[in-house]
Image (cartoon, grey):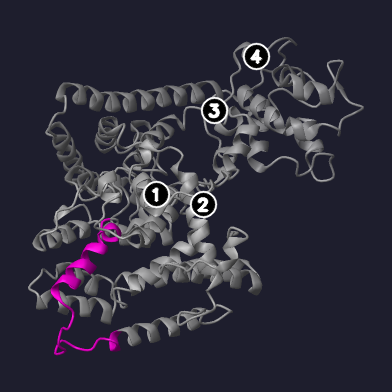
Amino acid sequence: MGLAPGCVLQNVVHVANCHEPLPAHAHAAHLWHAGDFSLARNHACLYRQLLEHTGQYLPTIDSPMFAEQAELLSTSTDLAACWLALSLSPSAYGPEILGAALFELQVPISPVVDALLRACDATRGHPYLTARHDASRQAAQRHIEHAIGRMLGEPGIDSSAAVARIERGHRMSMHLQGAWHAAIARHVRERLLDPTVAMVELIRRKSRFAVGYHNRLKLADRPFDDYVVQDPEHFVRDLAHSRWIVRGHPEQSLLLTRLVAFGGPMFRVFSGEELDVMRAWIASLPVGASAGPSTNSSRVTTSTPYAQSVPREHRIAEREPVRAASGKVGPRELYHRLLNHENNSTVFDDARAFAETWLARAAGIAERGPDALPFADYTHERLRHWFEDRALHQAQSYAGPGQDIHKPREQVVEEAVQLCPMIFVDGGWVQRWTNAGHVETGIGTLLYKIFSDEIGNGDTQLNHPNIYRDLMRQMGIDLPDFRSRAFAMSELFSEAAFEVPAFWLSISQFPRRFLPETLGLNLAMELSGVGGAYRTARDELRHYQFDTRFVDLHNTIDNVSTGHSAMALQAIELYMDAALATASLAASSTQWRRVWTGFRALAIPRRSWKEVFAKPTYTV
C-alpha cells in the first residue's frame, strides 16, 4: 500500500462526472496522496525513498518484475489489489470506495509499519512519516466526509443501504490490513526468528539452479540433485548432520570455509545475505544433537511471493495485448459508450481500433502541410526553438481588440454549440494519469496537474465544462445530459463535433501504449489555447455580451512560460531525454515521429483513397 497510496480513489473522478460535487471532493482527497502535484511530496515517491534508505530497491509497481522479484507475502497485495479492483468500477462500488478511502485517511500508515519506523533512529524522522501524519490529512478526510454526505443526500437513494455499503468498505479494509498484520507476525515468528526455516527457504529458492552440478553426490543415500529440489525441508535436516557442517560452529564448517570460499566449487554462488543465513542456521544448531527430524521440520512454512501463486500462463496472458475490434463504431456511439464504459465492457477494443485508425491517418500526413514534422532528428534545442517560434507566431496572429466583428451572433452561438461535445470532456486525453504507477512519475505529475486544472482541482466552480455550461445557458441553449444517448444523437451537433472528443476518450484508455502520441496531442491541445484563436473568440463573445470566462481562463493557464503549454513541452523533453539516453539515433527519431503524430492528431485527419483497398494500420 505504501507504493500505491490513494489508489482506491484514482478513478472516482473522470471526464464523465468531474463537474459533480461528489467526485470533485474525492479528487481533492486524492490530491493529498499525490502530494498536490509535487513529485517531491508524492507519498508513493516518499515511501520508495524510505525503502531505498533501508536498502530495499524494488521495480516500479506497474512492472511485471515487481511481483516476481519482491519478497512479498501472499497477503501483502490483498488490500492494494482489493482497492485497485474497486477503483475500476467507481459507479458500481462508490460507497465501498468512500468507506475504504476514509479508512486509509484514518489509518494512513499500517500500525505495524508505523511502530517499526518510529522505533528506528534511522527512519523516525523520515519525510514519509511526516507527510502521512501531516495536519493536512484532516482536510483530505473532510473531503471524503463531504463526499459521503453528498452521496447520502442524493435524491432517491436508500441511505441505510448506502451507509451499510460504506461501512462494508471500511470494515473490509480493516479486515484485510488485520490479516496482513497476522501474516507478518507469523512470518516473523516462524521464519525470520527461526534460522532453520530461513535456511529451508534459501534452499527452496536456490535449488532449481543447483540441478546438474551434483550428479555424483549423495546426501543421506539420496541423489543430491533430486533431494534438494523435491524435499528441501528434509534436505536441510540431513545437511545439518553431514560432514560439511560443524554444528554450532559456522567458522569450522566446510560449507563456509571451503565450498563457498575462493577456489571452492560454490564460490560466489551465494550472496552475502544468503551466507549470513547459512551462518545463523549453523550457529543455531545444537552441538552433539543426534540425527533425526528437526523439531521445526514438521511445521516449516515458507512465504509464497504473489507471482509464484499465479500460474505462469496466466501471468503471460496478462501482458499480451487484446486484439482490437473492427473499428466500425462511429464517433457518436463511441463517445457515448466511453462516457458510460462501466456499462460497456467491450468498448475498450473499439476505442483502441478507433485510436489506431486515427493515428494511422495522422502519421500519413505527418510530413506534409503547414504542421509538417519540423525536424527529423530530435534535440531539446530544436524542440525549444520550434516551440518559441510557434508561440510567437500564434501570439502575432491576433488582429487586436480594435477590429470589427463581422461574424453574426447566430454563427458565434452555433460555433460554440458545436464545441460542446469536446469541451464537456476537457482534459479527457490525460484522464488516466491519475492512476498508481503513472502519477508518481515525472511525466505523470505534469499530466496529472494538467488534468486536475481542467476539471477544477476539486472545485466544481472552477471546472472548465461547468463554466462552459454557464455560457450555454446564457446563450439560451438547453442540452440533455452529455452522458445520455440523447446528447450523442442530438441533431444540434454535426458528426464532426464528436470525432476529436471520441479520439481523446479512446487514446486516454491506453496511457502507456500511446504515451508518445499522447504527449504530442497534449502539446497541440495546450498550444491551441495560446495566441490568436482564443483571443479572437473572446472578442466575439464580448461583442455579443456573452461570458468570456472560459476563453479567458485558457488564455492564462495555457501560457508558454509556466502554464500548460510549458508543462506539455517539459513532458515531451522528459520522454525524449530517456529515449536519447537509451536508444540509437534512429530509434529516438522513431519515438519523436510518434510524438509528432500525436501533435498532428489534434485535427481530424483526412481519409486516404487507399482505405478503399486496406484499413490503415498503426504500429507501436
Callout count: 4
Q: In this view, does 570 lie to the left or right of 69?
A: left
Q: Write down the quadrant of residue 288 in the picture.
A: top right
Label 1: which residue?
334
Local crowd size for mark 1, using a 10 Å CA cut-off: few (<14), some (14–19), many (≥20):
many
Q: Distance between the residues labelled 4 and 3?
A: 15 Å
Q: Assess whether mark 1 and mark 4 are in contact (beta carbons under 8 angstroms).
A: no
Q: Is mark 4 on a helix, strand or loop?
A: helix
Going by the numbered disc 4, the residue's amino acid type is Ser
Q: Is mark 1 on a helix, strand or loop?
A: helix
**The stretch drawn in magenta includes residue 410:** yes
Q: What x and y, as percent, mark residue 438? A: 43, 52
Q: Assess whether mark 2 and mark 3 are in contact (beta carbons under 8 angstroms).
A: no
Q: Distance between the residues labelled 2 and 1?
A: 11 Å
* Front residue of this view, candidates 52 and 247: 52
Q: Give the range drawn in magenta.
A: 395-424
Label 2: which residue?
353
